[in-house]
Amino acid sequence: MIWNESMECMPRSQIQELQLERLKSVVERVYNNVGFYRKRLDALGIKPGDIRGLDDLTKLPFTVKDDLRDNYPYGMFAVPLREVVRVHSSSGTTGIPTVVGYTANDLDSWSELVARIVSEAGVTADDVVQISFGYGLFTGAFGLHYGLEKVGATVIPVSSGNTERQVRIMRDMGSTALVSTPSYALHISEVAEQMGISCQDLGLNIGLFGAEPSTKNLRTEIEKRWGLFATNNYGLSEVMGPGVSGECEFRCGMHINEDHFIAEIIDPDTLEPVPFGEKGELVLTTLTKEALPLLRYRTKDITRFIPGQCECGRTFLRMDETSGRTDDMLIIRGVNVFPSQIESVLMEIEEVEPHYQLVITREGYLDNLEVQVEVPQKIFSGEFRALERLERKIRDRILSVVGITVKVRLVEPRSIARSSGKAVRVVDKRA
Ligand code: DLL
């Protein structure tokens, strides 16, 4: 179902007209209310009145995560704190956390955008939706929560963790849709099986997966286990949280809520836009946010726009699933490698389980990548040659697809740590 047809199916010209009008007003607001932006714009000699067309967007300065950190916690807010009704924050595992804020209007927009995304995935008022993201400073759970309530779904706010309880709740309360990271959905299925409960019998029809990268192959694996329809949705706390973009039933890219964000794809080295349809770094400008408007925020996520019209009738531009973050890119003996490329290869090999980790070590000046992947117990009880053959098969596939030689280590079931949130795929042991 299309939640807001008048917006989501607007003709291109109208989308652009609305974007321009909103862009002008957001530049005006940050110029007048955020010292950081006033300084930046003054330094570039740009006045709000200089924004006359959407092409003028490229005159505006970029914003990066460090700008938010330097202004921690509230320095980039465009309204006084008394108008802010909610804050969320990043976990701060990679440094000073970033704090984001929302006015009452921001929360309304957020629910609206999430309502669109869950409707795209097929959720309706008839669904019972289990939210297995952690409630708290993370935007995932609260973000999905209010959008799901808006469409009238029955929300079960389980939060993450206590996986056996997740399974019992699913069985007893009749969950029909699951909100989680893709890796946690896999883990829940494992635990259900250990409890002697068949996932296929549990009645989940829809998976709303996001917050971490996943390949189509991995989502297909989740579908097989649960017998559900898996959809991907994308967002980041700095620009709002979930609700930036999501897949519709045709699953050919995630529609970006373009009435609230302008998306660009740039070359992360030259900072110039890439030709339409080519891969680069996603940059987002918020058009309606009141508490924390951001100009040209560099997400570090690598994706591309998908050309053409979607069969669903929505006119909003689609972005491809992200193939990684610029800061996740591994350089192994000179070759650029994204963990997602390895995941894609692994998920095509029937004998392996969908649990893997990439361990990087350095010997002298050489970087080594070890791919650890779980295989069923029975492989270990078979002949040693079969193990070797499988290792070689994986190594050869990775070499031919990704172009690097890796060490493959087959490991026992459940030996790779599970997470109830974002999975840790890369362990970098280089000093
Ligand atoms: O993860 C917001 C979110 C919550 C999105 C729930 C969807 C569902 P952060 O914790 O700030 O916010 O992390 C944002 O996570 O820059 C991406 O690198 C990654 N990410 C989020 N969704 C996807 C996705 C939330 N569908 C960072 N595919 C982003 C790939 C994703 N990566």
Image (cartoon, rainbow, N blue to C red):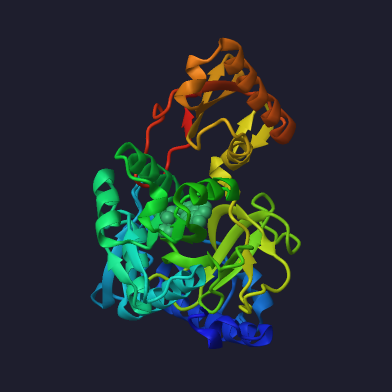
Q: Position of residue 74 (x, y in %)?
A: 32, 63
User: Residue at horizontal 27%, vertical 63%?
Assistant: 156
Where residue 82 sits, quadrant-wise, is bottom left
Q: Nearer the viewer, residue 237 or 340?
A: 340
Q: How many marks?
A: 0
Q: Nearer the viewer, residue 179 or 365?
A: 179
Q: Position of residue 272 (x, y in %)?
A: 70, 59
User: Residue at horizontal 73%, vertical 57%?
Assistant: 278
Where residue 320 sits, quadrant-wise, is bottom right
Q: Position of residue 160 (x, y in %)?
A: 29, 50
Q: Position of residue 327 (x, y in %)?
A: 54, 43
Residue situated furthest top in the rendering: 384
Drawn side of residue 87 relative to residue 289, left or right: left
Residue 187, visible in the rendered structure: yes
Q: Nearer the viewer, residue 321 or 120?
A: 120
Q: Nearer the viewer, residue 270 or 396?
A: 396
Residue 214, visible in the rendered structure: no
Q: Is residue 282 above or below residue 17?
A: above
Q: Is residue 260 above or below residue 171?
A: below
User: Residue at horizontal 57%, vertical 30%?
Assistant: 351
Where residue 420 sits, quadrant-wise, is top left
